């Protein structure tokens, strides 16, 4: 296991909690500008009162403290700590922005789900950028302050040309998380959506990392975007107008209606939900799987990776 010279386990947890709180306050500070003009709940870049371009710029600027705090936690701990912090700050923004019901009530259905799929791609690009910055800052910190880590493996994600193991891990996490979201996402309650997403992606990431152990989780980190796009695409394929969609929407709480006839659960969450709670779930799942994999046993070294390469979250 990694030995940390700077912070104890308790201090690291306190740093993570404080970082999430501070980063979340910055996000929440720009929330009024990101809200829809009519004040409806649910955050979408393309319904922001300031316009989509300014909304994207505000998200980039507002995310800088979260990335910096994530890099700090990743440098004094494990790499997934940084991802957890970044996702946690976004989760506070998603929680404060309110239910997705507001977006559903004002959207042009089902066509606006195509806009949501495009928005999910924008959030995913931002996530990849955050991962790259956190990774580079962690590497720089380890070079300048080598006493932070005793482990030489910095677990740096490669953002291009993933190998077949990483691709298989990504598809496995996506399939498991999609099924979990289909079952668990049943309402537009914000807490229920965020909680279900954390659970679904933690489960998917943990199983994928266990079956396909590797030190580059970039494939798994694509799973929230893939699940979102699949869910939105399912709405576009199943419903050709607002009438059938609204009927399916209201029938989801009725007895005697099969799960597969309900409004697709993954489509109840907005891109901000997937970008935030999805990332939190992935980081938790990867951390749990890697921690289990690196539990030392007498006279045994895990075969899936060298013992000194342990960067278990």
Image (cartoon, rainbow, N blue to C red):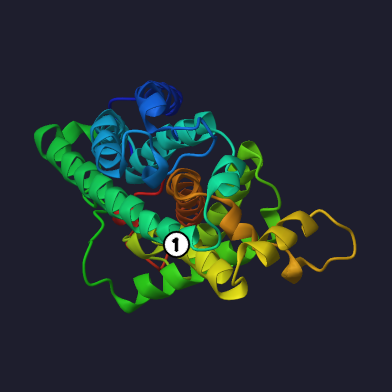
**Location of residue 212 (image quadrant):** bottom left
User: Which quarter shows the C terminus?
Assistant: top left
Q: Please state which of residues 131 and 238 is positioned toward the viewer in this rendering.
A: 238
Q: Position of residue 99 (x, y in %)?
A: 59, 38
**Relative vertical location of residue 298 with respect to residue 32 in this rendering, above or below:** below
Question: Does the rendering let one see residue 219?
Answer: yes
Q: Please state which of residues 212 and 243 is positioned toward the viewer in this rendering.
A: 243
**Would you call the spot at circle 1 few (<14 residues within 10 Å), some (14-19), or many (20 or more)?**
many
**Relative vertical location of residue 142 with respect to residue 268 in this rendering, above or below:** above
User: Which quarter shows the N terminus?
Assistant: top left
Q: Position of residue 136 (x, y in %)?
A: 16, 45
Q: Image point 54% across, 34% down: which residue?
A: 40
Q: Position of residue 94 (x, y in %)?
A: 49, 36
Q: Left or right: 76 with respect to 286?
A: left
**Location of residue 58 (image quadrant):** top left
Q: Image point 55% across, 50% down: which residue?
A: 269
Q: Image point 26% across, 57% down: which residue?
A: 157
Where does label 1 land, which residue? 223
The furthest residue to the right = 256
Q: Please state which of residues 51 and 23 is positioned toward the viewer in this rendering.
A: 51
Q: Image point 69% across, 55% down: which residue?
A: 184
The furthest residue to the bottom = 164
């Amino acid at each position: 296991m990694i030995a940390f010279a700077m912070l104890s386990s308790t201090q690291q947890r306190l740093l993570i909690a404080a970082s999430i709180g501070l980063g979340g306050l910055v996000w929440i500070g720009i929330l009024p500008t990101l809200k829809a003009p009519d004040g409806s709940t649910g955050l979408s870049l393309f319904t922001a009162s300031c316009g989509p371009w300014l909304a994207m710029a505000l998200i980039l600027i507002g995310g800088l403290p979260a990335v910096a705090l994530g890099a700090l936690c990743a440098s004094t701990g494990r790499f997934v700590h940084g991802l957890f912090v970044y996702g946690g700050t976004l989760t506070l923004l998603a929680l404060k922005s309110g239910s997705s019901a507001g977006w559903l009530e004002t959207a042009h259905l089902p066509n606006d789900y195509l806009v949501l799929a495009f928005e999910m791609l924008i959030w995913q690009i931002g996530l990849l950028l955050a991962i790259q910055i956190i990774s580079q800052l962690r590497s720089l910190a380890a070079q300048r302050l080598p006493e932070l880590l005793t482990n030489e493996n910095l677990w740096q994600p490669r953002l291009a040309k993933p190998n077949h193991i990483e691709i298989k891990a990504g598809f496995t996490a996506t399939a498991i998380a999609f099924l979990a979201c289909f079952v668990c996402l049943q309402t537009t309650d914000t807490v229920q959506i965020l909680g279900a997403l954390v659970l679904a992606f933690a489960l998917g990431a943990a199983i994928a990392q266990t079956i396909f152990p590797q030190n580059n989780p970039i494939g798994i980190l694509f799973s929230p975007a893939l699940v979102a796009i699949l869910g939105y695409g399912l709405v576009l394929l199943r419903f050709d107008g607002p009438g059938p969609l609204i009927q399916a929407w209201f029938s989801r709480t009725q007895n005697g209606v099969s799960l597969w006839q309900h409004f697709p659960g993954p489509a109840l969450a907005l891109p901000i939900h997937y970008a935030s709670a999805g990332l939190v779930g992935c980081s938790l799942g990867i951390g749990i799987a890697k921690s289990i994999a690196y539990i030392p046993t007498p006279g045994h070294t895990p075969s899936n990776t060298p013992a000194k390469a342990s960067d278990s979250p």
